[in-house]
Amino acid sequence: MSDAIKVGFVPLASAARGILVVFCDDALKVGPATAKALGGASELVKRAAGAGSFKGKSGAALDILAPEGLKAERLIVIGTGKTSSLKGNDFLKFGGMAASKLKAGSASMTIMAELPDGAMNTEQAVAIASGLRLRAYKFDRYKTKKKDGEEGALRADVSLAVGDATAAKKAFASAGAVVDGVIIARDLVNEPPNVLYPEEFARRAGQLRKLGVKIEVLDVKSMQKLGMGALLGVGQGSARPSRTVIMRWDGGKKGEAPVAFVGKGVCFDTGGISIKPAGSMEDMKGDMGGAACVVGLMHALAARKAKVNVVGAIGLVENMPDGNAQRPGDIVTSMSGQTIEIINTDAEGRLVLADVLWYVAKKTKPKFMVDLATLTGAIVVALGTDHAGMFSNNDELAERLLAAGIESGEKVWRLPLGPEYDKLIDSQFADMKNTGGRHGGSITAAQFLQRFVDGTPWAHLDIAGTAMGAPKTDINQSWGSGYGVRLLDRLVADHYERK
């Protein structure tokens, strides 16, 4: 796991080390402990703010080197804007901004977790700590040399000066587990496809056993016995055999129905016989972003000992175009018994999910299922990269996901389902076809999946625009974002976990 920053919590009155980070509002006002720590340097801040037109707006920063009157080597003042308008996600951003000021090499930093009216509460301080770690993530394990201008490794020791260090440490034990889950998901998405193929992905998911997660790996023979012809059809052209991994965390009451999360894990997608254009095909190493999220989420829930029963299931395949590959015109039989005419072999993720969704619905009988998939380019056209597309057969689940998205900052936007769209995937030769054409492409993909949930409350998240290659943010500078881990952890914590 790549983690460049160690975060600790100390009392507000502790002496600052290395870089000192403080917060001020849009009137340049700081808290009492911060004012005491700054001492005579408060006047320096005012002069520097005037010279640099710094007005304490949210997200603005003032960086003072070798500040006179302070032992700190640098003083960084981060503006919060009007404190009455602050939300939880703002503190994640502040932590990310602080991390952005760290340079390669070893460093120490002290952050005064205080607003003008006093110490930040525990949740706010922990959000800063999470933002620090998320921003500092970097995937460079395969680089043996650094080019001019490239930064080397960062190793930072950060102390958050807080009102209640004991409470913050306890709270960050859980929040840090969620950050770990995001980092795991990012690592998986960023790995090259020659390293992370279905068997290796399954092996890495198996490492969750150390946290008490029960792992079952279905090989090709097992899936053939189950009749998972839709999933197996996708992988039959690859030299790498397909796998399905079922993960179970039993943190709730014995016998209580679990909540379930299903991830698309196409470890590389050439498009198969309906081959993709060469340009940017390398990005298709990230077509397993849904499965990466599910593994990261299961880590987060198990590591923080979530009081809920959870099933995580991922279908792992490679979509390759050899002489044994699936052809347009083929008809496959899914585990549900429904038959599918293959129109386009590049509409493969829904075939993988079809069998895994049916397996989870029938074998575990969950309270609900949420699947995540980098499923369609159409969702990027519709929503860009700020929202994942959400489709659901259950209004309550959809509303809870919308709320969790706002709270976590991993936003979703609901799109419609309906029989009018369903007609577009009816086939004259089989029960359905695997694509309904260009119009409403994300919707017809969701309509396809809905045929395999067996009436279970369900939501489908199309994360093609958010899981990989999305614009960099204050808390993510990585190609793989780890999208979905924080969203779904919040969903579970807010609505399904025993308090």
Image: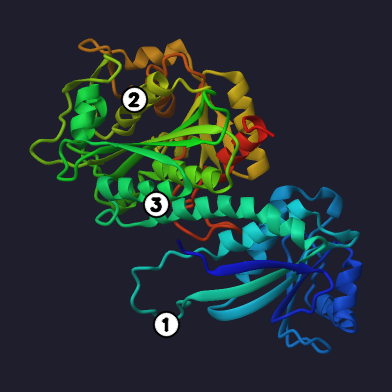
Q: Tell whether label 2 touches label 3 (CB within 8 Å).
A: no
Whole-percent x, y for residue 114 in the image:
82, 63
Q: Which mark is residue 354?
A: 2
Front label number (1 vs 3): 3
The numbered mark, 1 or 3, whose residue comes first in the sequence reads 1
- The residue at 20%/24% (across/down) is 225
Q: Which quadrant is the N terminus positioned in?
A: bottom left
What is the crowding at mark 3: few (fewer than 14 residues within 10 Å), some, or many (at least 20)?
Answer: many
Snapshot quadrant of residue 238: top left
Secondary-structure class at tag 1: loop
* Res 342 visible: no
Label 3: which secondary element: helix
Q: Earlier in the sequence, mark 1 or mark 2?
A: 1
Residue 82's spot in the image, x, y percent? 85, 55
Rendering quarter of residue 308: top right
Q: Amino acid at mark 1?
A: Asp
The C terminus is located in which quarter? top right
Separation of marks 1 and 2 at Cα, in angstroms: 48 Å
Kindly identify the residue that appears in the image at 51 percent across and 27 percent down: 258
Counting residues from the start of the chain, the first of labels 3 and 2 encountered is 3
* Residue furthest left as drawn: 323
Q: Which residue is mark 1?
A: 148
Describe the colour scheme in one phrase: rainbow
In screen coordinates, is 257 left or right of 464?
Answer: right
From this view, report whether residue 196 is shown above or below residue 15: above
Q: Which residue is mark 3?
A: 189
Q: Is residue 2 positioned above or below 18 on the image?
A: above
* Pointer 1 with pointer 3, Cβ within 8 A: no
- Disc 3 versus disc 2: distance between alpha carbons? 22 Å
